Image (cartoon, helix red, strand yellow):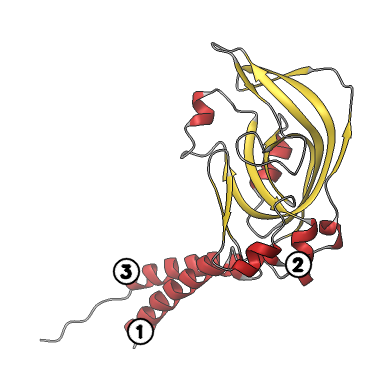
Amino acid sequence: MVHVFVRLLLCGSLILFAVSLWQKDVLPDASTLQTELLDEPQQHPVTRAAFQTTVNNVTYSIQPLYRYDLYGLVVSLHDAQGVVDTVHAKWKDSLNVADLCVVWGDNVRSGAYRDIRFSSAQYQCFWQTDSSQAAGRFATNAISNNHLLTDNVSIAKNIHQARIGDQIHFRGYLAEYSHNDGFAFKRGTSTTRTDDGDGACETVYVEEFEILRRGGGPWRTLLWTAVGLFVVGLIAWVRVPVRFKH
């Protein structure tokens, strides 16, 4: 009887893990999004002089171009400092901590993002759909891939906590940045939401970052619950004596 219970626990936890893994990144319904996400990003020119900062022994020069303030829904992301990212390490770019692909405005109003599949690469965000109706409703000027820069450990931690489906807000500067640590490196930024392709991403030096509301509903919690139950089941399986019939 005990072994039957343990088997059910192990099987049940695996099923719960699989379902939670599938559901945790489902994007929330537009009706649940905060009204601030209906707004366009705010952008204002500045005349601030370039400044320097050092991260991981590399000194960067940052040239702010515009004040930038954005409320958005995270639809895809890329960890620029993750183990699968080789380009940032090669270019000694520790200032770019993550890339967040977000939607706002008309895409929030229409809810078209719910019928779109999003993905991120090391420098790009992609979207595709099998629905011509969703494609027609999707506003390409209300999505952006944001290269987020920070030299602040606390802000970097907050950025890395963002997940698909989260509603976020950040402010800072659209900026160019560069270094000359062994070779000349420089990255620019888009300054409009209507461009596309290479160079269309926003590069933002972040001064404030917050997660307004978590996505994923209960599924992220249930995912870790499933892991815990599976571990309990494994321990029980090892500890419960096995009886053999002769």
Residue 231 located left or right of residue 115: left
What crowding class fits label 3: few (fewer than 14 Cα within 10 Å), some (14-19), or many (20 or more)?
few
Q: Residue 110, which numbered label?
A: 2
What crowding class fits label 1: few (fewer than 14 Cα within 10 Å), some (14-19), or many (20 or more)?
few
132 or 164: nearer the eye? 132
Residue on which the image places disc 3: 238
Q: Is residue 71 visible?
A: yes
Task: Give the residue type that dot 2 points to.
Answer: Ser
Residue 240 placement (x, y as % from top left): 32, 75
Q: Earlier in the sequence, mark 2 or mark 3?
A: 2
Q: Is residue 225 above or below residue 246?
A: above
Q: Is residue 235 above or below residue 208?
A: below
Residue on which the image places disc 1: 2
Task: Give the residue type that dot 1 points to.
Answer: Val
Residue 228 placement (x, y as % from top left): 49, 66
What crowding class fits label 2: few (fewer than 14 Cα within 10 Å), some (14-19), or many (20 or more)?
some
Residue 195 placement (x, y as % from top left): 70, 41
